[in-house]
Amino acid sequence: MTETPVRRLVLRLALPTMLSMVVSALYNVVDAAFVGHLSTEATAGIGISFAYMTFIQAMGFFFGHGSGNYISTALGARQRDNAARMAAVGFFTPFIIGVVAAVVGIFFLTQLSVLLGATPEVVPYSNDYLRYILLASPFMMSALTLNNQLRLQGNARFGMIGIVSGAILNIILDPIFIFVLDLGVTGASLSTAISQIFSWSLLLWGTFRNDSVHIAFRNFRPSRQCYRDIVAGGLPSLIRQAFNCTAAICLNYAAVRHAAPGQDASAVAAFAVVSRTMMFAFSLALGFIQGFQPVCGYNFGAKKYKRVLKSYNFAITVSTAFLCIVSALGLTFAPQIIAIFRSEDPELIAIGARALRWQCAAFPLVGLTTATNMLFQNIRMTLPATLLSAGRQGLFFIPTVFILPCFLGLHGVEMTQAVADVCTFVLSVPYAIWIARKLKNADFE
């Protein structure tokens, strides 16, 4: 971690992480692609459920990044016992939270669907999809934690194996449950739940390898200091994912409010498809940027600041170049991409193509903002990391999705994410310049 040439090291760690992120995104994309052949309302139903999935991600990434960043730094400082205790606290806490969320959600299922933005005709479908996702919540939250802990220890390859295996199982089970067994939206939900639990089992097994920090219940000794350390390393992820969840709900409400009469289901479904498509594309860039995180954590802990700076610059350069290519493809083939999910609904394709093109126009800016956010998070500068995490979907997206449509109608909803990305980039640039200078001058004493 502290001697291998930085670019080679980042690439080695990034490739399995990229594959893990892409495959994780495939869960949502595959479900949307298969369910899209049922009806527009069914597509809208899983779109509504996406907001709850972001809540699961919020918990998983918060504890995964919070505990994983601590583990990475502790291993760099050769404090393995502290790393083992943090691994246990980071794993068992989200599992317990997931159990509580599952119980509450099942008892108030319809109310949850309405809260997430479902209209009366969409509620039955969102209920069907949420039911098994809720039951699998403890496993999904703690699986995300495990994957991030393994990745931030430098064991991204085994994390990739666990995630990929579950996604392959999901791809196999989806058509069987949805069409062969005729379970519809319920089949998509059940397939995802089973696949996620399978991934969880493999990831947990991976922690017992010799090159990993083991998860042991005897090390589950939560304390105020443990949670302070998790907050220090994970609060930016929690803020980012919490705003993602809130933004998804606000987007559902805005789509319903500003759609033409009788087209609210098409609008909600269109934005659901665009969200999943962009998440899939962004997962590759995010996976690459996350490949630089363990390099950053280890070398910052070892006070090798120039290696941190070199890996940071490399992450920005490669991710931005990739996002430019993806954006060009999205701008060119937007209608064809949306039609893959629901070719039977021309209105859905029209709304989705416009929204996709707007997002692609600003997409290359996300490379710098994400890498800068990750850097601050890994070196435990919590305040700027949290501010940058709140920017994209919180400080800028949520106000814009309420204000812009008042003047431009549904077109304003379609433009919202692009406007938020530009504003976040403007916020990030001064922080990027400042931290690059500090790393160059080793100004951390």
Image (cartoon, grey):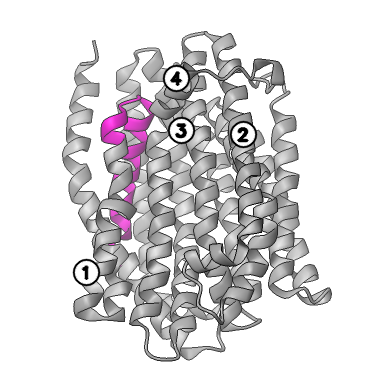
What residue is disc 3 on?
Answer: 10
Q: Identify the mark at residue 298; answer none if there is no mark.
A: 4
Which mark is first along the chain, 1 or 2? 2
Side (left or right) of 208 relative to 59 = right
- How packed mark 3 is, by other alpha carbons closer than 10 Å (few <14, some 14-19, many 20 or more), is many
Circle on res. 258: none
- Horizontal side of 152 relative to 257 (left or right) equals right
Q: CA distance from mark 3 to mark 1?
A: 41 Å
Q: CA distance from mark 2 to mark 1?
A: 39 Å
Q: Which residue is mark 1?
A: 403
Is label 4 or label 1 in front? 1
User: Which is more N-terminal, label 1 or label 3?
Assistant: 3
Q: Circle 2 sits in a helix, a strand or a loop, which is it?
A: helix
Residue 125 is situated, as x and y percent measured from the top left of the image, at 63, 74
- First to last magenta residue range: 361-385
Q: Quick one: label 2, few (<14), some, or many (20+) residues within 10 Å?
A: many
Check disc 4 and give the amino acid type: Tyr
